[in-house]
Amino acid sequence: KVKCVISVQLVTKKQVSQTLNRGLSHETPCVARPFSVVVAIDFGTTSSGYAFSFTEDPETIHMMRRWEDGDPGVTNQKSPTCLLLTPDLRFHSFGFAARDSYHDLDPEEARHWLYFDKFKMKIHSTSDLTMETELESVSGRRVRAIEVFAYALRFFREHALKEVKDQSSSVLEGNEVRWVITVPAVWRQPAKQFMREAAYLAGLVTPDSPEQLLIALEPEAASIYCRKLRLHQVIDLSQRPVINGLDVDGSRPFDSSFRQAREQLRRARHSRTFLVESGTGELWSEMQTGDRYIVADCGGGTVDLTVHQIEQPQGTLKELYKASGGPYGAVGVDLAFEAMLCQIFGADFIESFKAKRPAAWVDLTIAFEARKRTAAPGRANSLNISLPFSFIDFYKRHQGQSVETAMRKSNMNFIKWSSQGMLRLSAEAMNELFQPTINNIIKHVENLMQKEEVKDVRFLFLVGGFAESPMLQRAAQNALGRNCRIIIPHDVGLTILKGAVLFGLDPTVVRVRRCPLTYSVGVLNRFVEGRHPRDKLLIKDGREWCTDILDRFVSVDQSVALGEVVRRSYTPARMGQRKIIINIYCSDTDDITYITDPEVRKCGAITLDLLESGAVAASAGDNDKGPAFERREIRTTMQFGDTEIKVTAVDVATGRLVWASIDFLSN
């Protein structure tokens, strides 16, 4: 039995009683079912982890168990985001286990296995993301991205549920768990939907109970946690002004505050259970109503900024400016290191080495990662990075000269060769690798601070794994420290994870958000001579219509409160129509008139299934009575105030719910 899908452009009937706020009306958010536990997964570019809290004890957040085989000197509270699949595409391992297993494979054997590392960035950089988008493994083999993400989420699901059950005195049913997955705030709707579809595929929840899964925005989650902080739980880099690396009285070197931050971070890693304030923390007692602050989530792949106001006394948050950021994460330093290797040894050789010796390439990146974490401003001695023997041997056999000769010919004075098989990077060389990425971050924050809605911010919170870097901390203090107080939570790498748990416990904590884009549909309006262009004229049933008129749902940077909705009514074009499909268009600007304007692009579609609702059958019956069919209304309700766009629909004549879905991945 084949379903007939008819895509038509429909005349929109706006609700007569629209509010003045561009068609927004307010509905009380639905009260969610009572969950017993909230499990949050912070799915990062370089590292991932989970945490959970029982709803009967919401002030206690349990962090996941430490992983075995972690790196010396590096917190293993989270696991590297890397996945290993067998040659026949079955799951083998994730995290440290995947990395070590891949390392132990014979080089020839490794070429047939699929190892994925830092694959989250692909979702950010793909402009036409679909369910069929593929990822390329280190060895060059490709597989559907949705399957890679589902394998990773399934891994966390199994580990998290086992640990939750170990700590729970009662037997938990699957529907008693609320899941939260974090994503960058700068991700658009297709990427958010992609993560939701991956969670369905992984078995976290089913499409029949979408409310069981929340998508949390990473800087927003960090902001939710930061509002709970006490003074002893943060490092304030702006406590004392600094001139030329010294305090103004010359008594204390600048780097001592960073040493203090690192020591506090080291101590925080020994605890797996964290207690949070039942209200807001004492840090917020210094803030007055109307004070603004920025949260900069500096992760592995992206840097994400959000601007919030805390509303006293209830402690809810209001977003003041749409989320911004870009691909300025710590991976940028890794790419700069790879570019440096290409400059010394040749881009063709590096690409060949990555393809022929993939496991050895991973070893090299791990070695650099360990040294990258120790880079600090003012460091005098060089950093040694071991080159795998296979790199040295491969280069000599394929290029006909030694690595030492290549180093000498490169004329790169900041990098030396050690006879012990190491690259010696001077402090200047490491600084060169960091600066482009750090400069992008600082420039973006400075530009954000110039916006009218962001001027005079009191605090800048640095969170995320990259915020642990003294190089970034020093640059932020030098460039921004005189404009606002720079605060770093002790557990900076876990701030987002803890905030995601708090968000799952109370999704209403962010009361107002800003729309990142203008969302609209195309409609027909009466043609007005002299106002509408002639190429938009459509004559139908003797009437003149203007096609492609843009009907806004919400506008870019518009404030939308939680519970506010946009309503539109649609009429089937003909009797027996089984589906109504309404294309959705978006734009970065609000200065648009038609859906054909250059700035406008199709980004998704709303589907209303009339057959499942019984509307078709009712329509056919009404049609025997005359023109009743023409008055058939399907009223849709769209909510833009959450982290995801949601849609529901009802058949006005029968009062029955119409199955409605919104899809951004089948573009």
Image: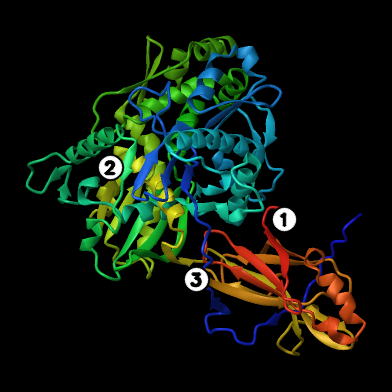
Labels 2 and 3: the sequence-earlier one: 2
Q: Residues within 10 Å of mark 2 (few under 14, many from 20)?
A: many
Q: Which residue carries the number 1 mark?
A: 667
Labels 1 and 2: the sequence-earlier one: 2
Residue shown at 71% from the left, 77% from the top: 569
User: Disc 3 marks which amino acid?
Assistant: Val
* Residue nearest the observer in this picture, 447 or 294: 294
Colouring chosen for the image of the structure: rainbow
For the residues labelled 1 and 2, the Cα–Cα distance comes to 43 Å
Residue 560 numbered mark, or none: 3
Q: Is residue 136 above or below residue 518?
A: above
Secondary structure under tag 2 reads: loop
Residue 342 numbered mark, or none: none
Measured from the top left, where is residue 582 in percent x and y? Answer: 74, 67
Measured from the top left, where is residue 106 in percent x and y? Answer: 59, 11
Measured from the top left, where is residue 220 in percent x and y? Answer: 42, 55
Q: Which image quarter is the N terminus in?
A: bottom right
Q: Which residue carries the number 2 mark?
A: 490
Secondary structure under tag 3 reads: strand
Q: Is residue 349 above or below residue 658?
A: above
Q: Is residue 351 above or below residue 233?
A: above
Secondary structure under tag 1 reads: loop
For the residues labelled 2 and 3, the Cα–Cα distance comes to 33 Å
Q: Which image quarter is the C terminus in?
A: bottom right
* Residue nearest the observer in this picture, 2 or 193: 2
Q: Are marks 1 and 2 in contact (CB under 8 Å)?
A: no
- As drawn, is 558 to the left or to the right of 23? left
